[in-house]
Amino acid sequence: MDTCKQAPCIGWYFYTIMQADGNPKTAQTFLYISGGPGASSLGIMLTANGPCRMDEDSLIENELSYARSVARRRFRCPRFSWTRQANGIWVDAPIPTGFSQGPIGAGWENLILDLVDFVKKFFEEHKDLNNGVHLVGFSSSGKLRGDHITGNKCINPPPLPSAQMMATLGARLVKSVGFKVNLVGVMMLSGIVAPLATIDQMKAGLVQCKDRLAECNRNGPGGTPISVYCKQALNTCENNTAQRLISAGTSAYDIRVPPGGENTSYRLHPGNVPDLLNLKSVQQALGVSKEWMPYNHQVHDQFVRFVAYDTTYQVTSLLDAGLKVLVVNGDQDFMTNAVGAFEGVSKLKGVKDYGKLLKESPAKDIKVDGRNFGKMWASQYTNGAKLAFIKVLDAGHMMFLYEPSGAQSISENFFTGGYWKSR
């Protein structure tokens, strides 16, 4: 889909649509943008939350190998697909992530405006999918994500602002004029709502880090982040938190293991996607002609600084508009830790004191397959808003690889509003 407004800029977002297993015409819809920005959502669809995934032992060397892999049923349709009850849309964003093409945009504001334009055009062209739309953002490390798609060990770069991006996108869509996207909720996986609240929970001397975060957000609630200060904040805070942990031999994404050992606790081990997506026959079928990479370093370098951006205002705006918001974090993840994330959510205050009421609500065990996999706090308000926070037990940053069945259960209950029906 062409999203550029002025020549000579030409850009296209690559997206994948998967219909719900049930009735697509009545099913709700989710739009997923992967972590980074810079990590391909298509890769995640093929390895984690899509209707079919590659086995971890699938090795595709050439066209003949691909044909044999299909014959051997290397693609499986797992029971934990997110499309059992919902239509799914996976978007490679920002441009030129994955198969998307065009120049990298400059700045946070341009990125958000471009995404707003894309999403509105998409649903205007696909009105059959404009039914109970949910935005899903995953704040993951692009390098971590990419290495898991190719089956290699990973290193630990900074956390990235995909969840913040989706919260901001949702807030803009609510207020935008013209064609209306039927947006009903935003889910933030392993995200950071309020970086200052997260830092407050870390006991080291981080005064300088907090000062830099304040400079990044100098334009006030809802204002555009100041790029140069956001980059300084990222570097300062990273050196004072995660890098110290990594230097001590502990992963910032799973504090139980050394860096690179995160996959030892995974329940889901994905296969090698680049070999598949770079086959000539596959690209011809998809209508693309570009080397597919799970992670775009240039996109990462352009936007990683905005992890310091505080999106409390945007999340509060979503709740003020009567939408539902779900924040999910793993309890073994240091980089976007559950303690700090819950602290940020508990401070949300708009036309209602959302966070206070959420914090006062009793924690509830949530189960899948007869076992307890998380704790949830949920609250709903007289203006129609719904807010929930889930701490996934024994899970690091890549939550749906640690807990694929649990992640599916979370997504389905979020889409249907199940977490609030008994309250």
Image (cartoon, rainbow, N blue to C red):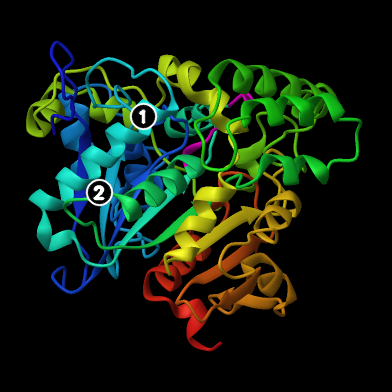
- Disc number lying in front (1 or 2): 1
Percent coordinates x, y for residue 239 in the rendering: 77, 20
**Is 375 left, or right, of 144 in this rendering?**
right
Q: Residue at x 53, y 37 (%)?
A: 140
Quarter residue 55 falls in = top left
User: Is 288 located above or below residue 362 in the figure?
Assistant: above
Mark identifier at residue 325: none
Residue occupying the point 42% across, 65% down: 321
Element class at badge 1? helix
Give the side of residue 3 with respect to residue 349, left or right: left
The percent position of residue 260, horizontal first and vertical second, equals 65, 29
Residue 264 to residue 2: above or below: below
Between residues 341 and 297, which one lies in front from this camera angle? 341
Q: Quadrant of residue 44?
A: top left
Q: CA distance from mark 1 to mark 2?
A: 39 Å
291 and 204: which one is in front?
204
Going by the numbered disc 1, the residue's amino acid type is Leu
Label 2 is placed on what type of residue? Arg
For marks 1 and 2 on the same chain, the one whose residue lies earlier in the sequence? 2
- Extreme residue toward the top, this view: 8
- Name the residue that disc number 2 marks: 73
* Viewer-proximal residue among 288 and 202: 202
**What residue is pinned by disc 1?**
111
Magenta region, residue range:
154-162
State the image coordinates of residue 266 (x, y, percent, origin top left).
58, 48
Check if mark 1's residue and mark 2's residue have beta carbons within 8 Å: no
Number of residues whose C-alpha sits closer than 10 Å to that of mark 2, classed few (under 14), some (14–19) or many (20 or more): few
User: SS at mark 2?
Assistant: loop
